Amino acid sequence: MTLFQVVVLALIQGITEFLPISSSAHLLLPAQLLGWPDQGLAFDVAVHVGTLAAVVWYFRNDLRTLIVEWTTSCVTGKGTEHSRLAWAIIIATIPAGLAGLALNDIVEEHLRTTMVLAVTTIVFGVLLGIADKRGSRRKNLAALGWSSALWIGLSQAVALIPGTSRSGITMTMALALGFDRQAAAKFSFLLSIPIIALSGLYKGAELLALENVPWGQIGLATAVSAITAYLCIRLFLRFLDQLGMMPFVWYRLALGALLLGVVWIG
């Protein structure tokens, strides 16, 4: 890839990783419409590291508190609101981790198609809209128990299907369970940390086995995706209550229609 392509794709990844609009669908468009080459393993690792750095830095104070109080609760046996949230993250991570180990190869070989991306972008966009409109939005993170965490974790496993959007499906489930938008978004972002870290480690191990790794491009993609993702998280949480989810729903429907057009023209 050229440096221009690296920057554009890293910007796309940084913007779309945490918004409920599917990063995989967006990364497909340059290849389909402009004939750009496949991003490759090195780029995947770089943007995973970048987006992970962004979400960890944004929630650094929350993470410090979660780790300290979770560790303390393990020693004393006395739970707190933050230790329970840490356990909820752990519980919700397990389904996606197991699904990834069992189904990753099947997904890569059979489901990474433009038609699948188009359909899932539309279907899960509609579900996001329904959950946002009909959810009670009465619960905050303090009300997040193991049952809700498990349901959100199971929904995250569905995000293995390209076009679903990991952040989109977890927010959809949280909203459907009655959580408010800020709680749904914050838990989705915190939940992304172990999943992105595990995925980055898995892909990073493969990268180390390669020769002639483009380290310059990796560094550039990491920096661009990290800065973009950090700004995206900050702005999304700031304006979420004012905007709601419907702008993202309509955007997903338009994107899905565009992808269907690519399929039919192709």
Image (cartoon, rainbow, N blue to C red):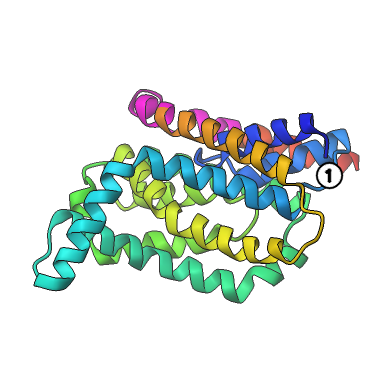
Asked if the stretch drawn in magenta spans residue 4, the answer is no
By secondary structure, the bulk of the magenta-drawn segment is best described as helix
- State whether residue 219 appears in this view: yes
Magenta span covers which residues?
Answer: 235-251
Q: Amino acid at mark 1?
A: Val
- 14 and 256: which is toward the camera: 14
Is residue 238 inside the magenta stretch? yes
Q: Is residue 233 above or below residue 17?
A: above
Quick check: 64 left or right of 235? Answer: left
Pinpoint residue 195: horizontal percent, then vertical percent. Answer: 48, 59
Viewer-proximal residue among 113 and 72: 72
On-image quarter of the N terminus:
top right
Q: Residue at x 44, y 34 (%)?
A: 233
Q: Which residue is mark 1?
A: 263
Image location (x, y in percent) of residue 221: 66, 39
Quadrant where the image shows the C terminus: top right
The local secondary structure at tag 1 comes to: helix
Residue 224, compared with residue 86, is above or below; it is: above
Residue beneath the point at 35% across and 23% down = 242
Left or right, 29 with reference to 72: right
Q: Position of residue 176 (x, y in %)?
A: 36, 50
Residue 244, can we see it? Answer: no
Name the side, left or right, on which 152 lies relative to 42: left
Closest to the observer, 57 or 194: 57
User: In the image, residue 126 lies at what x, y percent?
Assistant: 53, 43
Residue 228: image quadrant is top right
User: Which residue reaches farthest bottom?
Assistant: 102
Packing grade of label 1 (10 A; few <14, some 14-19, many >=20) is some
Q: Is residue 223 left or right of residue 55?
A: right
- At horizontal 51% and vertical 74% (from top left) the residue drawn is 98
